[in-house]
Image (spheres, rainbow, N blue to C red):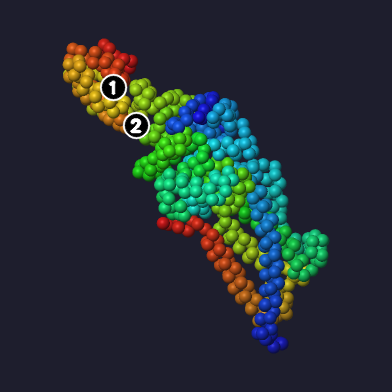
Amino acid sequence: MRSATPWSDVLSYLVEATGETLYMVGVSTLIATAFGIPVGVWLQLTARGGLRPNPVVHRILSFVTDLGRSMPFIVLLVALTSVTRLIVGGSIGSTAVIVPLAVGAIPFVGRLVQNILSEVHVTVVEAAITTGASTLRIVRSVLIRESLPALINAIGVTVIALIGYSAMAGVIGGGGLGDLAIREGYQRFNDRILWSTVAWLAVLTTVIQLGFTRAARASDRRRHASV
Amino acid sequence: MITVENLTKSFQGVNALNGVTLDVEAGTVLGVVGPSGAGKSTLARCVALLERPDSGAIRVDGTDITSLDGSALRAARRQIGVVPQGDSLLRQRTAAGNIALPLESAGVPGPQRRTRVGELLDLVGLTDKATAYPDQLSGGQRQRIAVARALAANPSVLLADEPTSALDPETTGSVLTVLDRARAELGVTVLVVTHDMGVVRKICDDVAVLEQGRVVEHGKVLDLVGDAASRTSSALLPAVDLNPINESSYDRVADVVLVGFAAVGALLPEASHRFGVELNIVGGGLTRLGETPVARFRLGLNGERSDSALEWIGEAGGAVQRSLKGPQGVAA
């Protein structure tokens, strides 16, 4: 048995891995949100009872979205290697992981967003229509603004999910906390690193979740409902 | 100002509207009433341009707006302010923000928008609630904000779909007052769809009764109440037959409808005096339609010239609805 890794080394491992995880998850969340919200809006617009109902487009979009969501991330990670190389110029490292993470998360965000937008009451949407508002304005000022708290929560859910997915980043050398726990902790029988990482992941996800919940609540004007 | 011509609309083979024709004069309030399933909501949705009729026309200022698309459709929608049925305010926006929505759609610049929103808050009496969110307002206040929003872009027509259906009688009054003010102060033409005859009683100049997708009665409220056979009169006037009376104690028994201060106050004593008949009010009562007092009385008359007295009342502007007893029955 080797002697346990000094705490100072554990800490520097954790700092580095946290940086990698936040980088991978942060950038891919931004990309997934930037593309996922339009996908969700499009899904909702073309849905039955939407502002621009179009069964054909809706069905195709739904199919692609669900296909994307059902793909195991580890498969996506290796399947997208050539695409990744094309986009970021390489197929290993943290930056390379961002591509499959974002691609995997877009349909996830899209479906979440559509479900949220569909909750905006039809009376409210129709009231906006009768004011002569354009579809774009209704999407922005009504659908998205009215659902903002739920959308912020959905992004929070996405971040947590992506932290989970990013644990597989080690497969293509992406690093991060999951990789640390598996490679340095589990595979090298280093319990100190393994359990420190697990504990730190628990803290990190809790803090992130709390942050998004707070932000969602701060954006919600319905909090006085009990008055 | 707004006319509806021969409007038809069916859903899956069921005719909701069967050739509805209506005409609302500029600056008046028309109440469209009828039982549920009569087509009121469909009519409202067609006029709100949320539903396209199968055939027929809706004209605002002579222009048919049923076949428009794109920006022309959006412009037409701004011509018709809509107070939708149910809660329709954006819950993430303040009262002022909600009222501003149509102005944003119309591209009105910020400073003018704020001025206009201020005017409308004043019109609906909620200036102190400008920064309140819908959840901080009562149902009646929310509905008044919805009326203000509908009026924001200066529409020529205001359509209110069941504006009081979710409200208690007191708040109903405040919402109706606001609709009435909109007509009086902005000269807007109002079309209010409702199942509540109380709305007609309080603010409507005209009424249209819808049944099975057809207009079965359409006219001025004050004209229709004089017609014993009209649904409007039976719905709005006091009942005359609450107490059974002994008809044999009178020479003549008749129902009369009197409209306006002068008629209600003076016609009966005058008739009694002129013809020397004894004139008893044996049933009915007094009500108010808008600002106008209206009475429906069941009269028991005694005296030789009872028939002449009834005839005179008819000529002087009272509607003698029926003679229950006596040879000179005027339709029954």
Badge 2 sits on which subunit?
A: B
Picture coordinates of residue A77, whole percent (x, y): 76, 63
Label 2 Cα neighbours within 10 Å, binned few <14 / some 14-19 / many ≥20: many
Picture coordinates of residue A107, whole percent (x, y): 68, 55
Which numbered disc, 1 or 2, marks the residue that appears first in the sequence?
1
Does residue B90 show up?
no
Does residue B107 show up?
yes
**Image depth: mark 1 or mark 2 in front:** 2
Q: Nearer the viewer, residue A221 or B166?
A: A221
Q: Which quadrant of the structure image shows residue B106? A: top right
Q: Could you tell me how far apart the alpha carbons at marks 1 and 2 are, in whole angstroms?
A: 16 Å
Q: Quadrant of the N terminus of chain A?
A: bottom right
Q: Residue at x 60, y 42 (%)?
A: A49
SS at circle 2? strand
Q: Mark number for residue B289?
A: 2
Q: Is residue A216 above or below residue B192?
A: below
Amino acid carrying label 2: it is Leu
Q: Is residue A222 left or right of residue B241?
A: right
Q: Is residue B267 left or right of residue B150?
A: left
Q: Residue at x 48, y 51 (%)?
A: B95
Labels 1 and 2 positioned on one and the same chain: yes
Q: Residue at x 54, y 65 (%)?
A: A214
**Which residue was labeled with disc 1?**
B256
